[in-house]
Amino acid sequence: MSTVKITPSAAAFSTSIKHFANIQRPKFIAPRRAFTIISMAPLEICVKQSVTTPNKLGDCPFTQRVLLTLEEKNLPYDMKYVDLRNKPEWFLKISPEGKVPLIKLDEKWVPDSDVITQALEEKFPQPPLTTPPEKASVGSKIFPKFVAFLKSKDPSDGTEQELLDELTAFNDYLKENGPFINGNEVSAADLSLGPKLYHLEIALGHYKNWSVPDSFPYVKSYMKSIFSRESFINTRALKEDVIEGWRPKVMG
């Protein structure tokens, strides 16, 4: 999948067009999933703009979740970068709350990564990414525990142990059910958790000199597998942006 630079319009959109015209590229496809390139106009999606590098994607794990879904479903998309520190008028008109991600589906702007990914699954069911209900919440408590530990100023307040407890549970789950949350196939739950673990790795490494312990080999293998997917590489934020994005929460 390639990127074409587009000259900004009068509305000051900074745009990168993802397209498939006459392009073939290798891509990991889970067993029993059909690989289909969809011929359609790119979907418009508003994303956070980098605060460190011009015309680059910013550090929103919820936006990356949506972009991962688009990538894994081989859907073309058009990213419109939004400076969330100085939100432009055109963006506030379509997003009164001023939040990303925001995607245009059937001529309507749709907010919230939960709503967006569900809508994409219903509108573009192939390849399927649905996680069975009984597995959908696996690993979901890791992110809030990571945030609490990252923001903590008291080493003895128990936030680190709470994060370790969640990682222990996730490691045990992967040992019995992995390599991914839904077994051998990547699903929506992985596309949600992966970006959060990416932030965990970078932010805790930078601000607390902390990393996932070697005693969690299945978690570490899971992170390596997710982070090395082409879809993830195509949609990840710069490490510098992740660090800057968490700075206000860490520094207070």
Image (spheres, rainbow, N blue to C red):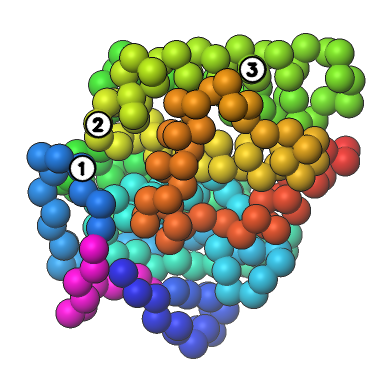
Specify whether residue 149 is in view: yes
77 to the left or right of 132: right
- Residue 2 horizontal/vertical position (percent): 35, 74
Callout 1 touching callout 3 (CB < 8 Å): no
Question: In the rendered image, which residue does mark 2 sit on?
Answer: 184
**Residue at 45% across, 66% down:** 79
Query: Disc 3 or 2, which lies upstream in sequence?
Result: 3
105 to the left or right of 191: left
Q: Label 3 sits on what residue type?
A: Leu
Q: Main secondary structure of the magenta part?
A: loop
Query: Disc 1 or 3, which lies upstream in sequence?
Result: 1
Magenta stretch, residue numbers = 17-26
Callout 2 touching callout 1 (CB < 8 Å): yes
Question: In the rendered image, which residue does mark 3 sit on?
Answer: 164
Specify whether residue 115 is in view: no
Q: Is residue 137 magenta?
A: no
215 to the left or right of 36: right
Circle 3 SS class: helix
Q: Label 2 sits on what residue type?
A: Asn
- Residue 78 horizontal/vertical position (percent): 39, 68
Question: In the rendered image, which residue does mark 1 sit on?
Answer: 30
Callout 3 touching callout 2 (CB < 8 Å): no
Q: Label 1 sits on what residue type?
A: Ala
- Residue 73 horizontal/vertical position (percent): 25, 51
Residue 244: mark in rendering: none
